[in-house]
């Protein structure tokens, strides 16, 4: 049996989290980003915020230039990779592990799997509108099992 109380609780919690994530990203983190430079740290009795000091690192900016240089200077370090043509691989998976080219071939090494069910909680527009007002004490929270009874101020 489905329990609407549990659904209502989950929707309100998700709306709270969405609201808090937005406030956290758009106000709190943005404010700290404006105040702190790389290498800065600020601490209070509630915690710490800091910005890391970026360290230089080497990256490959041009794969072909690197390949050409290695091929010319260390040819034994060139690796030839064997792999299935991505278009054929996609066609095999799309066709349920079968290739049809005039003859039907069952493909070895391919199996069907089923993922785990995914729970999604999508608060309504009303829940999203209510979340900040509930957190600020402007609205009285509805009676939802698991939430303490609180009166709005």
Image (cartoon, rainbow, N blue to C red):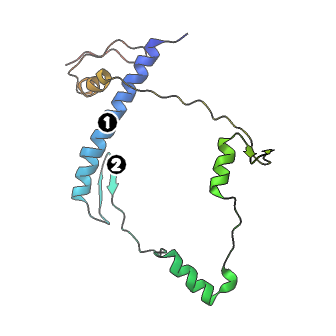
Q: Position of residue 123 (x, y in %)?
A: 37, 25
Residue pointed to by mark 1:
20
Question: Is 143 rendered above or below residue 118?
Answer: above
Residue pointed to by mark 2:
47
User: Residue at coordinates 61% horizontally, 90% vertically from top-left?
Assistant: 73
Q: Position of residue 109 (x, y in %)?
A: 78, 48
Q: Earlier in the sequence, mark 1 or mark 2?
A: 1
Direction from residue 8 to residue 107 in the image, left or right: right
Direction from residue 70 to residue 3 in the image, left or right: left
- The mark lying in front, picked from 1 and 2, is 1
Q: Quadrant of the N terminus?
A: top right
Q: Residue furthest top?
A: 1
Question: Is 113 rendered above or below residue 79?
Answer: above
Question: Is 40 rendered above or below residue 32?
Answer: below
Q: Position of residue 133 (x, y in %)?
A: 23, 25
Tag 1's secondary structure? helix
Residue in front for this viewpoint, 86 or 37 = 86
Q: Which mark is residue 89?
A: none
Residue in front for this viewpoint, 74 or 121 = 74
């Amino acid at each position: 049996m489905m329990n609407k109380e549990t659904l209502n609780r989950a929707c309100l919690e998700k709306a709270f989290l969405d609201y808090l994530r937005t406030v956290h990203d758009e106000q709190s983190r943005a404010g700290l980003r404006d105040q702190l430079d790389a290498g800065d740290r600020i601490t209070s009795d509630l915690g710490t915020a800091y910005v890391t000091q970026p360290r230089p690192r080497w990256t490959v900016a041009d794969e072909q230039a690197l390949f050409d240089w290695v091929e010319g200077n260390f040819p034994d370090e060139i690796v030839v990779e064997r792999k299935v043509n991505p278009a054929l691989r996609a066609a095999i998976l799309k066709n349920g592990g079968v290739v049809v080219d005039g003859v039907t071939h069952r493909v070895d090494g391919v199996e069907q799997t089923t993922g785990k069910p995914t729970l999604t909680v999508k608060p309504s527009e009303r829940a999203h509108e209510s979340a900040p007002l509930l957190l600020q004490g402007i609205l009285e929270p509805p009676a939802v099992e698991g939430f303490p009874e609180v009166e709005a101020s």
